[in-house]
Image (spheres, grey):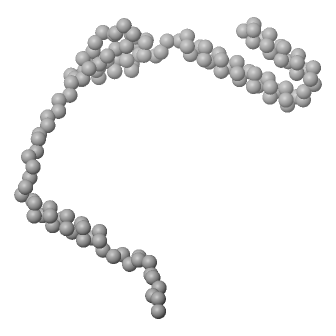
């Protein structure tokens, strides 16, 4: 606080010496005050605890109930770094399909149809002049 007041007084004295207009003085003072406000907000936000740290937080209770309902979540005590780890079990079943040879005829027909459609002339050929 005292440091901010001294800085403000120094700036005001310098501005008076330079004989700035009132608009310029007010603009500089407003800029200085805004910077100080931002610094105060940053300092106060780091000092306060987060809302989830409070025991009476309604969100915390709701989150705990949701975790308790989920059977796939196993909570582990926090590690050395202070982080909690969660593990979830997921089961996936795979079925290996056998190669199908029943549709060989239709597959060959489909490939021929694709080849024929790709080879169609779209009428965009370059015309060449005949030499006569």
Which one is in front, 120 or 51?
120
Q: Residue furthest front?
A: 132
Relative image position of residue 12 (x, y in whole percent): 85, 18
123 lies left or right of 3: left
Residue at 65 percent across and 21 percent down: it is 38
Is the N terminus in the top left, top right, bottom left or bottom right quadrant? Answer: top right
Nearer to the camera, 96 or 42:
96
Give residue 84's quadrant in the image. Answer: top left
Residue visible at 88% across and 28% down in the picture: 22
* Residue closer to the observer: 54 or 11: 11
Residue 92: image location, x then y, percent: 17, 33
For the point 47% across and 85% down, the residue is 129
Relative placement, left or right, of 46 versus 51 is right
* Residue 125 image-quadrant placement: bottom left
Quarter of the image for residue 34 reads top right
Which x, y percent locates residue 130? 45, 88
Residue lying at the far left in this picture: please name it. Answer: 102
Q: Is residue 101 above or below residue 66?
A: below
In the shown orientation, is residue 45 left or right of residue 107?
Answer: right
Q: Considering depth in this image, is 106 or 61 the residue closer to the camera?
A: 106
- Residue positioned 27% across, 70% down in the render: 117
In the displayed structure, would residue 125 be above or below residue 56?
below
Residue 62 percent coordinates (x, y): 34, 21
Position of residue 77 in the picture relative to residue 103 (left or right): right
């Amino acid at each position: 606080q005292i440091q901010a007041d001294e800085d403000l007084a120094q700036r005001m004295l310098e501005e008076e010496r330079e004989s700035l207009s009132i608009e310029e003085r007010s603009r500089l003072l407003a800029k200085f005050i805004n910077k100080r406000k931002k610094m105060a907000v940053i300092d106060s936000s780091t000092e306060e605890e987060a809302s989830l740290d409070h025991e009476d937080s309604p969100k915390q209770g709701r989150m705990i109930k949701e975790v308790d309902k989920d059977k796939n979540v196993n909570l582990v005590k926090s590690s050395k770094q202070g982080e909690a780890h969660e593990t979830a079990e997921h089961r996936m079943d795979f079925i290996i399909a056998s190669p199908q040879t029943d549709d060989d005829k239709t597959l060959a027909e489909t490939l021929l149809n694709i080849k024929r459609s790709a080879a169609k002339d779209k009428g965009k050929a370059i015309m060449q002049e005949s030499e006569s």
